[in-house]
Image (cartoon, grey):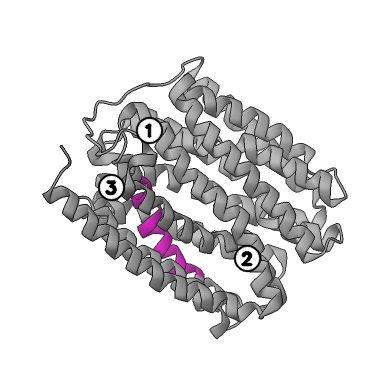
Amino acid sequence: MIRKIFRSYKEAYSGLPSEAWMLAAVELVNRTGTMVLFFMTLYATRHLGFSLAEAARVMSAYGLGSLVGTYFGGRFCDWIGAYNVQKASLGLGGIFLILLGYPESPFPLAALMFAFAATGEALHPANMTAISQVCPPQIRAKGFALARLAGNLGISVGPVAGGYLALINYHYLFWVDGLTSLAALALFLAFFGSAAGPVHSDGHESPPASSPWKDRLFLLMIGLGFLVFLVFAQLFSTFPLYVREVYGLPENAIGLLITVNTVVIVAIEMLIIHRLQGVEPARVARIGALALCTGFALMPLGRGFFYGAFTVVVWTMGEILIMPLLVTLVASRATSAAQGRYQALLSVSFAGAMIAGPAIGSWVYETYGPDYLWYGCGLQGIVLFAGFSLLIRELAREARHPAG
């Protein structure tokens, strides 16, 4: 039995190029310090005395910066190379993270959050672009899943450590987070040196449109991705607040709940993605979107750490089924020379959700009560299921009647 399990894991992780492993290693180190974003709402309200609305505006500034950083980060990948973008992002992002611990009023904190996001979030489209360039199309989903696994393995450390650091002194969060970003830069330079990265792939994709703005099915994917990310954005805003206020759990327990998410991803995501090779990505993403939203919708139906962990497992299964497959769907629509632009727009949809998500979530939370927010997430899951069903039909129609 143990030998069979070992063989399953070996098969799931085999076949990926060394560059993909190196890119994942950089994600691992960078994400090990992820703690500021998870605790910013609590830091702003409980430590600095901001109102919930002021804290939401700080988080929205992060979303706006992400919008700028992800879009131009992806564009720059097509101009100067994905590796150069990652190096600049890790260096500047680390510096701004350290500086974030010093402002004590809303505007300067929001301005630094914007600067941190505009630089730090450029890393993600660059990393996805690099993976799409070094991995052949048939194993791209595994490459994206490996990067997610590495990031989530790092995040399994960050929030837990951050929760304990916050109990001692919130300022430690910013220094540790910033220094891990700079450590990731050092690791990147050790692996890749001055290389600009690949500018093309060995794949032979033939997307139906040369520009992402002319590809209507790609735009549908982006719209659906935005709705998914809108729900997921609550993890960084109203989720920790709800767990603290309604479940009555302290910051270190919130970090442990996030760790449940990352442990499940690390344990089984690569196995699941490997088993799903050959299955149409949109069909998998449809189930994932519904499960993700259902997990959040279950939150009002119980209390306590263990029930909270159960809901985390539910939405984590949805996350596993949708996140790498959504990136794979997007990568399949672009030529190698346009991967940066396509991945940038997917990242922009996430950034847009980080702007709208905290604002919408906190408004519903305060106006109608937190339970209505989570039930609304459940309704969103039904909308997403219908939207992905439409995408599946349109992709099938396109395959039967290709343009040109």
Whether 324 is among the magenta residues is yes
Mark 1, secondary structure of its residue: helix
Q: Which residues are magenta?
A: 312-327
Residue at 32%, 43% in the rendered image: 215
Residue at 11%, 50% in the rendered image: 400
In the rendered structure, the answer to whether residue 348 lies left or right of residue 41 reads left
x, y (%) of residue 142?
32, 44
Q: Is residue 398 visible?
A: yes
Instruction: Give above or below for 392 relative to 172.
Output: below
Q: Which mark is residue 339?
A: 1
In the rendered structure, the answer to whether residue 43 lies left or right of residue 18 reads right
Q: Which mark is residue 238?
A: none
Magenta part mainly helix, strand or loop? helix
Residue at 46%, 67% in the rendered image: 315
Answer yes or no: do the residues labelled 2 and 1 have beta carbons within 8 Å?
Answer: no
Answer yes or no: do the residues labelled 2 and 3 have beta carbons within 8 Å?
Answer: no
* Residue at mark 2 to residue at mark 3: CA–CA distance: 39 Å
Q: Quadrant of the N terminus?
A: bottom left
Residue at 50%, 26% in the rendered image: 76
Residue on which disc 2 sits: 360
Query: Which callout, 2 or 3, points at the residue further toward the start of the chain?
Result: 3
